[in-house]
C-alpha cells in the first residue's frame, strides 16, 4: 500500500501527522508527502519519508497559479501512483481530490480539521467565496470510495446540513491525537509570577485580540501574572495578525512575545495556565497538549474548543469574544492554586481517555481498512 499525504504546510505534516505516517509504516504502508516549500521538508525526509514540494500559495485566487498547482499535483500523483490520497485542510481537500478523480484514484480520505477563514470570517471576501467553495467541496467529497474525517460534532452537523457529503461517508475522529508520553505532567517551578500562555498561529480568529485585552485588564497585577504569546503571524492566512500589531504589543510589554517555539513541552513546563479564546476550531491540539501535561486551560464555548474542556472540571469555558470573562477566570485561577492542580489532574485523565494518539491512529487506520487498504 502506498499512501500520499497532502497538506498546506510542511510544518503541519511534521508536527501533526508524522506519528500517523510512522504508524502506517509499521503496518507495511509506504507513506509519501507533499506540501508547499518549507523548512520542515528536510526534517520529513530525515524521518525516512519522501517529500515533494509544491508551488502553493494558500491565499491565492489567481487562476494561472491554481492551474499550475493542480498540474504539479497531477505530476506527483502520476509519479508516485498512490493507492490512496489523504488530504488535510480545505484547499488541499479540493485540489487533491480533483487531481485524484482526474487520475482515477478512487480511494480518498479527506480530513478537515477546521472550517477555515472562508467559513469563519464575515468579511466580504469570505462571503463571496463561500458559494464556489461549497460547490468545489461537494465535487471533491463525492465518490463511493471517499471518506471525510471531521473532529467535532458541530462540523458533522454543518457539513450534513450544507449537503456537502452523504452522512454515511463521514467519520468522527476527535483530534489528530497527542503523544501522552512526550506530553506528560512534570514538576514546575512555582516561584515568580503566575504565567499564562497563548500558543497558536497568530490569527485574529484565534481570539488573540481578546487575549491581549484580558492582559491589559489585569495590568494592575504587574509582578503577579505574566502573559506569554508563542507563535508567528501566518501570512498565508487572510486572518493573519499584522507584524506591526505584534511589535506594538511587544514594545508596550502587555504580553511577552516568544515567536516560534520548537519545543512546546519545554515551554509548557514553565507555565501555569494555557488560554485559547478562539472563535472556532476542529479540536485545538495546543489545548490537548496542555491538558496532557496537567495544566488547567481556558477556552471559548465554541465548536471544537468545548470538546477539550469540561467547564469547571479541567478548565473554564468563556463566551466567544468576551475579554472581561476571560480576565475574570484568569484572575480566579491566579488566586486558586488548589483548583489549578485539580483541573490539571482532570485534564490529564481526559486526554488519556479521549485524545491519546495511538487511539486516534487506530481509528484512522480503521477508515483505511474500510476502503479495502
Image: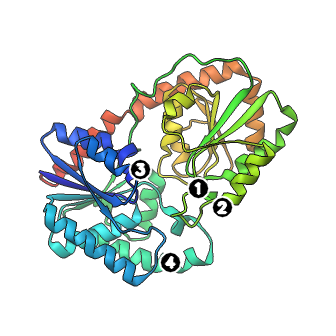
Tell me if residue 120 comes above or below residue 254 in the rendering: below
Q: Which mark is residue 233?
A: 1
**Residue count near mark 4 (Cα–Cα under 10 Å), binned few <14, some 14–19, many ≥20:** few
Separation of residues labelled 2 and 3 (CA atoms): 21 Å
> Which residue: 46% across, 63% down?
158
Asked if marks 1 and 3 touch (Cβ < 8 Å), the reply is: no
Tell us which disc is closer to us: 4 or 3: 3
Tell us which disc is closer to us: 4 or 1: 1
- Where in the figure is residue 27, as x and y percent of width and height? 15, 39
Nearest the eye: 297 or 199: 199
Residue topped by disc 2: 242
Separation of residues labelled 1 and 2 (CA atoms): 7 Å
Helix, strand or loop at mark 1? loop
Helix, strand or loop at mark 2? loop
Helix, strand or loop at mark 3? helix
> Which residue: 21% across, 65% down?
76
Tell us which disc is closer to us: 4 or 2: 2
Tell me if residue 43 comes above or below residue 128 in the rendering: above
Tell me if residue 140 comes above or below residue 234 in the rendering: below
Counting residues from the start of the chain, the first of labels 1 and 3 encountered is 3
Q: Which mark is residue 11?
A: 3
Task: Please say whether residue 141 is visible from this viewpoint.
Answer: no
Counting residues from the start of the chain, the first of labels 4 and 3 encountered is 3
- Where in the figure is residue 44, as x and y percent of width and height? 30, 46
Separation of residues labelled 1 and 3 (CA atoms): 14 Å
Residue topped by disc 4: 129
Asked if marks 1 and 2 touch (Cβ < 8 Å), the reply is: yes
Nearest the eye: 103 or 43: 43
**Residue count near mark 1 (Cα–Cα under 10 Å), binned few <14, some 14–19, many ≥20:** some
Amino acid at each position: 500500500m502506498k499512501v500520499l499525504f497532502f497538506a498546506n504546510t510542511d510544518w503541519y505534516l511534521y508536527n501533526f501527522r508524522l506519528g500517523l505516517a510512522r504508524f502506517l509504516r509499521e503496518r507495511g504502508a509506504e507513506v509519501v508527502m507533499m506540501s508547499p516549500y518549507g523548512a520542515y521538508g528536510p526534517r520529513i525526509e530525515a524521518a525516512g519519508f519522501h517529500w515533494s514540494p509544491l508551488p502553493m500559495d494558500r491565499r491565492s485566487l489567481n487562476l494561472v497559479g491554481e492551474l499550475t498547482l493542480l498540474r504539479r499535483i497531477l505530476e506527483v500523483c502520476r509519479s508516485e501512483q498512490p493507492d490512496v490520497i489523504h488530504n488535510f485542510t480545505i484547499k488541499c481537500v479540493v485540489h487533491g481530490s480533483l487531481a485524484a478523480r482526474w487520475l482515477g484514484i478512487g480511494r480518498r480520505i479527506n480530513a478537515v480539521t477546521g472550517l477555515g477563514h472562508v467559513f469563519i470570517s464575515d468579511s466580504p471576501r469570505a462571503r463571496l467565496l463561500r458559494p464556489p467553495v461549497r460547490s468545489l467541496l461537494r465535487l471533491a467529497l463525492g465518490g463511493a470510495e471517499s471518506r471525510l474525517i471531521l473532529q467535532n460534532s458541530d462540523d458533522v452537523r454543518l457539513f450534513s446540513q450544507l449537503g456537502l457529503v452523504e452522512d454515511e461517508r463521514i467519520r468522527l475522529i476527535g483530534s489528530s491525537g497527542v503523544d501522552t508520553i512526550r506530553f506528560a505532567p512534570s514538576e514546575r517551578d512555582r516561584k515568580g509570577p503566575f504565567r499564562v500562555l497563548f500558543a497558536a498561529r497568530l490569527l485574529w480568529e484565534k481570539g488573540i485580540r481578546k487575549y491581549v485585552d484580558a492582559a491589559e485588564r489585569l495590568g494592575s497585577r504587574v509582578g503577579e501574572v505574566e502573559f506569554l504569546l508563542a507563535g508567528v503571524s501566518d501570512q498565508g492566512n487572510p486572518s493573519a495578525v499584522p507584524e506591526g500589531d505584534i511589535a506594538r504589543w511587544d514594545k508596550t510589554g502587555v504580553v511577552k512575545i516568544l515567536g516560534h517555539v520548537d519545543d512546546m513541552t519545554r515551554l509548557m513546563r514553565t507555565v501555569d495556565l494555557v488560554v485559547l479564546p478562539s472563535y472556532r476550531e476542529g479540536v485545538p491540539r495546543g489545548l490537548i497538549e496542555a491538558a496532557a501535561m496537567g495544566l488547567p486551560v481556558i477556552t471559548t464555548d465554541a465548536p471544537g474548543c468545548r470538546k477539550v474542556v469540561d467547564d469547571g472540571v479541567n478548565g473554564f469555558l468563556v463566551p466567544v469574544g468576551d475579554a472581561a470573562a476571560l480576565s475574570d477566570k484568569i484572575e480566579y485561577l491566579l488566586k486558586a492554586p488548589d483548583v489549578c492542580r485539580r483541573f490539571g489532574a482532570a485534564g490529564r485523565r481526559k486526554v488519556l481517555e479521549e485524545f491519546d494518539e495511538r487511539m486516534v491512529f487506530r481509528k484512522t487506520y480503521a477508515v483505511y481498512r474500510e476502503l479495502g487498504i
